[in-house]
Image: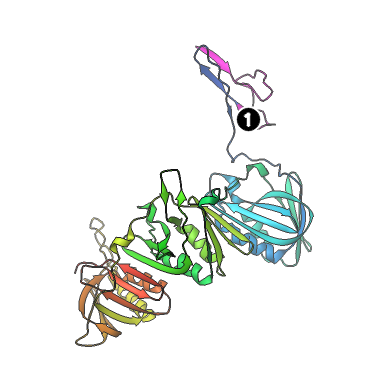
Amino acid sequence: MSRVTALSGSDRPVSPLAPADTGSMRETLSLTAMPGFAIVQTATPACSRRSLSSGAAMRAVIDATKLRDATKAVSRVVDSGGRIPVLAHLKLTAASNRVCIVATDLDISIETAVEAVVETTGTVIVPGARLSGLLVGLSGNITIESDEKRITLRCGRSGFKLPTLSVDDFPAFAALHDPTHTAVWPLNAADVHKLFAVAAVAACTDGTRFYLAGLNLCEGDSRLHGVASDGHKLICVATDIAYGDKEFAFDDKYRRRSIIVPSPACSLIARLFKGGAVISSDGRRLTAVGGDTTVTFKLIDATYSDWRRIVQPPGANTATVDSAELVTVLQRCAAIAHEPRRDPEKPKAVPCTVVSWDATKSDEIHFALSRSDADIDDVIAATGVAGQIKFGINPNFLASIVGAFGRNRVTMSIHDNRSPVRVDTPGAFGLVAVMQI
């Protein structure tokens, strides 16, 4: 066996015990190789190693309130407790009378811009939590200056200095790269709310089935639909936006006609783009653009379950009720349904509420539940009552769907006590699995 010593950037022999070259931030390694083979290898430290070289100096004057709002918006994805310190930082770039602020956690990237008077263009990487904390309560114009080691902020008689990281350490988030297979959907405020605030409520949250942990954007009647399900409940909303003829190509053999948007991304879009957004996707990533804010994130790489096979038309047993009144009675049932476990070895009791109506007797819906130490018998008024049915339901599942639909009247329908309950409202419907009673 022969020993082979790694070479530094200057191609000169370096002792295995020599310290790392701090100029290039590389460490030399001593390796063992078979005779006749030469190995040269360097190890580059992770982003956790700190560098105080922030890149080009910058100077800009910004309104403190606008900077605080923009910093708060992008800080939603700042990874403050992670193992990669640079992800807890924000990237500020001053150019063209704007300061762009970027944050990423490697799965989601948020970029927004603020109008500014840029005196010197440049880029700086600053701690996100510290910058957000310093901006609280400030008003008027704030001056930002940076040098090779730190950033200085001045607002009135207040002044602050923060350390910086190297611009090269901040990860670049890849944009959409396949224009031939990119779908574009312009969404108004109502569409954004329906897709990312209403439908996403039914997404899986327990982590057991990752492909259900998000919103499925798919085609229905040549229109864009949003579907979410956790296996117990399902919500489907329809829009008036043409889906288009795009196929998302991953290779020559594997194509999809739908995408899965992760639940965290759905929450961000619903909060940041209340006035509408333009959604673009190439099947691997999705970008939402609205005003001066852009959100780009990775999609769930999976095929969504065939939810259409469980969807049935409305059943013959129907009843229309006020959604707010229905949610209230279901919450009362849920308060009784969750019986505390006195014996930890026994499985947790599944809450079940018995729902029934009979069109031949009254226009009312009855809710009944009994536990060892409490019971409930509640009634709400209904219209359009048809048929006679009695079934069991999880009050929390039904309440989450009805509550997501807002203050509209909803129509419940069911074929029999084994088929799922269907809840219809204009432009959307939900399904809830029944329970045996």
Q: Residue at x 41, y 73 (%)?
A: 427
Quarter of the image holding residue 77?
Answer: bottom right
**Residue 305 x/y as whole percent:** 34, 55
Q: Position of residue 206 (x, y in %)?
A: 37, 56
- The structure residue drawn at horizontal position 62% and vertical position 45%, both measured from the top left corner, is 170
Picture coordinates of residue 16, whole percent (x, y):
60, 20
Q: How many marks?
A: 1
In the image, 369: left or right of 199? Answer: left
Q: Is residue 235 above or below residue 52?
A: below
Image height of 336 relative to 290, above or below: below
Q: Quadrant of residue 334?
A: bottom left
For image coordinates 41% across by 61% down, the residue present is 219
Between 333 and 299, the residue placed more toward the observer is 299
Magenta includes 195? no
- The disc labelled 1 sits on which kind of residue? Arg
Quadrant showing the C terminus: bottom left
Q: For the view shown, which residue lies furthest in the right direction? A: 119
The magenta segment? 1-27
The question of residue 23 being in magenta is answered with: yes
- Residue designated by label 1: 26
Q: Which residue is more in the foreground, 70 or 139?
A: 70
Instruction: Single out the residue that lies furthest toward the front.
Output: 245
Give 84 or 325, whichever is nearer the viewer: 325
* Front position in the image: 77 or 312: 312
How was the colour assigned to the protein in this rendering? rainbow
Q: Horizontal and vertical percent for residue 224? A: 45, 64
Q: Badge 1 local density, few (<14 within 10 Å), some, or many (20+)?
A: some
SS label for mark 1: loop
Magenta: main secondary structure equals loop
Q: Is residue 219 left or right of residue 373?
A: right
